[in-house]
């Protein structure tokens, strides 16, 4: 793994992730108190990263949740979303008996469970027929999670995408099945603010008032500045306040751009970062 401490993927580890402690605590409190969450922010601020940070926290503290992450940005239909969701669930199955009960639960279809030859992770392939059958499968999948021995947190990333499904009110379908679940908590994530807000605050929308909101803002500038200096120092380099300020001003504190600039500056600088490097 690269030694550059400024990551460009959503999450790698706690020590390379800046702050979000407050949001993390809020998310934990929502889970512990049975609240589903809608998380909204402009693009590239760190929603996906925060989900993985939360899942990492759950794992390291031994909090009693199973975690499932499904990115539905590439889905265009109920069928696609079932594939993504069942794949996400299958990835988390640890024992043979869990795998067996997963296969049994999805009784309305015959999923083929194989092993990905590269990653060694379980992999599901499914063949569908009717829309009805698909809806039953979704129900079976959710019932599997409802009967899971642990509470389950399902994060659905790019949730606004379900409005793009043709010929189906996916919100209504999903809401119908989700509202009866006790063992499963949902985190709906998205960057299209208007669509997301409409889904959860418009009285005509199926998901109306079914969640609490977490609006992810930019990282605090002073906290981010300290983080940047600390990351350079940990790798035996040094960067001055002036340079850090200049970076954060130029990136307008946007997380991804800040990471990208710092990543490059880290690469090209010697022990002491110069203004020229920046
Ligand atoms: N707390 C953080 N500390 C350090 N880097 C971060 C943090 N949060 C996000 N990043 C960086 O910002 C990038 C964008 O974050 P992420 O993909 O989580 O944003 P997003 O809000 O999910 O974006 P999109 O709306 O495009 O999906 C990440 O690839 C990572 O480099
Ligand atoms: Mg994202």
Image (cartoon, helix red, strand yellow):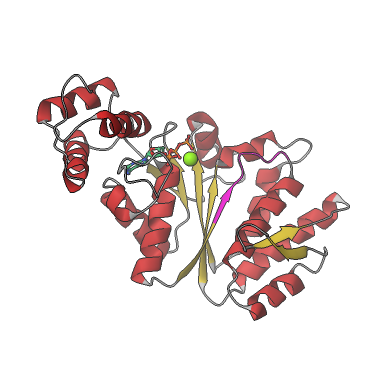
| Quadrant of the picture in which ligand 1 is shown | top left
22 left or right, relative to 140: left
Give coordinates of residue 188: x percent, y percent: 51, 47
Q: Quadrant of residue 142?
A: bottom right
Q: Nearer the viewer, residue 223 or 105?
A: 223
273 left or right, relative to 59: left
Q: Quadrant of residue 90?
A: bottom right
Count of marks placed on residues: 0
Residue 264 visible in rendering = yes
Residue extending furthest toward the front: 270
Give coordinates of residue 16: x percent, y percent: 30, 48
Verify whether residue 261 appears in magenta. Answer: no
Q: Is residue 219 above or below residue 251?
A: below
Q: Residue at x 40, y 48 (%)?
A: 11
Verify whether residue 73 appears in magenta. Answer: yes
Give coordinates of residue 54: x percent, y percent: 39, 56
Q: Residue at x 32, y 40 (%)?
A: 6
Residue extending furthest toward the right: 129
173 left or right, relative to 6: right
Q: Quadrant of residue 95?
A: bottom right
Residue extending furthest toward the left: 241
Q: Where's the C terminus, which quadrant?
A: top left
Q: Is residue 73 above or below residue 186?
A: above
222 left or right, relative to 148: left
Per the picture, the main secondary structure of the magenta-coloured stretch is loop
Residue 30 visible in rendering = no
Q: Residue at x 18, y 36 (%)?
A: 225
Q: Residue at x 48, y 55 (%)?
A: 36
Q: Nearer the viewer, residue 16 or 265?
A: 265
Task: Specify start and end residues of the magenta stretch as a single range.
Answer: 69-76
Q: Is residue 137 above or below residue 144?
A: above
Give coordinates of residue 196: x percent, y percent: 52, 36
């Amino acid at each position: 793994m690269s030694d550059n401490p400024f990551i460009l993927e959503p999450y790698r580890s706690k020590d390379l992730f800046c702050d979000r402690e407050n949001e993390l605590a809020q998310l934990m409190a929502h889970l512990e108190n049975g609240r589903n969450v809608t998380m909204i922010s402009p693009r590239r601020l760190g929603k996906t990263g925060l989900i993985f940070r939360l899942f990492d926290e759950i794992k390291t503290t031994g909090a009693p949740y199973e975690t499932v992450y499904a990115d539905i940005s590439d889905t265009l239909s109920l069928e696609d979303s079932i594939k993504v969701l069942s794949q996400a669930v299958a990835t988390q199955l640890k024992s043979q008996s869990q795998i067996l009960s997963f296969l049994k639960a999805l009784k309305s279809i015959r999923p083929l469970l194989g092993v990905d030859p590269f990653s060694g992770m379980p992999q599901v392939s499914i063949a569908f027929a009717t829309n009805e059958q698909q809806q039953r499968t979704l129900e079976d999948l959710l019932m599997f999670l409802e009967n899971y021995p642990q509470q389950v947190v399902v994060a659905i990333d790019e949730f606004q995408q379900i409005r793009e499904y043709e010929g189906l009110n996916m919100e209504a379908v999903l809401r119908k099945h989700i509202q009866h679940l006790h063992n499963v908590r949902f985190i709906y994530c998205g960057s299209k603010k208007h669509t997301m807000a409409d889904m959860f605050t418009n009285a005509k929308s199926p998901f109306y008032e079914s969640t609490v909101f977490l609006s992810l803002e930019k990282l605090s500038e002073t906290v981010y500045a300290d983080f940047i200096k600390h990351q350079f120092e940990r790798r035996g380099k040094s960067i001055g306040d002036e340079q850090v300020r200049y970076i954060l001003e130029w990136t307008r504190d946007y997380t991804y751009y800040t990471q990208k600039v710092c990543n490059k500056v880290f690469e090209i600088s010697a022990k002491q970062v110069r203004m020229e490097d920046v």
